[in-house]
Image (tube, rainbow, N blue to C red):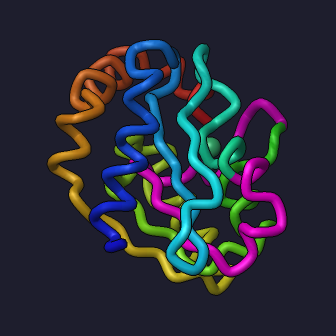
């Protein structure tokens, strides 16, 4: 199974909740260890918990040493007081994170990736990004986000 096919699986997971996750964008996350999918989730209806959070719970100890495929950059900070997905991935022992699209919010962009990289995790961004942008209607979400920038705290 290639990186491409795992990212496609993450998009398939996300599509289940497409349009249901406001105020957050729908994100898909697939965790793969030794070529097998050990966790797969979408952002829950209503916007949380985030996809990474749920996929890590599914994978349990199998997340250690796994690669995470996520359609949007994992969050690096959360105003809700919850633990950011970047920190959850670090704590679970994920060794590589493949991201389709950077989080475009000027307040969030790069933060999750920076945290992951600082923890020694390999981060690769841009895999199938154009296709993912279209498939998950992120363009619309980006637009709405810029119109309602004060709401950005709901994302983080
Ligand atoms: Zn998150």
Nearest the camera: 13 or 70?
13
Which is nearer the eye, 27 or 66? 66
Q: Nearer the viewer, residue 97 or 9?
A: 9
Quadrant including the N terminus: bottom left
* Quadrant placement of the C terminus: top right
- Is residue 78 rendered magenta in the image? yes
In terms of image quadrants, where is residue 46?
top right
Left or right of 145? Residue 84 is: right
Q: Which stretch did the figure color magenta?
A: 56-81
Q: Is 138 placed above or below 118 here?
A: above
State the count of labels. 0
Q: Is residue 110 magenta?
A: no
Residue at the image point whose x is 46% and y is 60% from the top = 69
Could you tell me which residue is drawn at 63 percent across and 53 percent down? 39
In percent of width and height, residue 119 lies at: 69, 80
Residues 129 and 5: in front is 5
Q: Position of residue 89 (x, y in %)?
A: 69, 63
Image point 38% across, 23% down: which residue? Answer: 145
Residue 140 located left or right of residue 78? left
- State ligand 1's quadrant: top right
Relative side of 62 to 123, left or right = right
């Amino acid at each position: 199974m290639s990186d491409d096919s795992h990212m496609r699986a993450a998009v398939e997971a996300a599509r289940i909740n497409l349009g249901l996750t406001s105020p957050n964008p729908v994100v898909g996350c697939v965790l793969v260890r030794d070529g097998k999918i050990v966790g797969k989730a979408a952002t829950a209806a209503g916007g949380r918990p985030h996809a990474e959070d749920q996929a890590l719970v599914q994978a349990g100890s199998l997340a250690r040493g796994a690669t995470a495929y996520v359609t949007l950059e994992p969050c690096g900070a959360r105003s809700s007081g919850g633990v950011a997905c970047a920190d959850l991935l670090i704590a679970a022992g994920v060794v590589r994170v493949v991201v389709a699209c950077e989080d475009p919010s000027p307040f969030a962009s790069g933060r999750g990736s920076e945290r992951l990289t600082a923890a020694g995790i390999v981060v690769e961004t841009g895999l199938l990004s154009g296709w993912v942008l279209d498939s998950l209607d992120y363009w619309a979400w980006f637009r709405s986000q810029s119109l309602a920038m004060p709401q950005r705290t709901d994302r983080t």
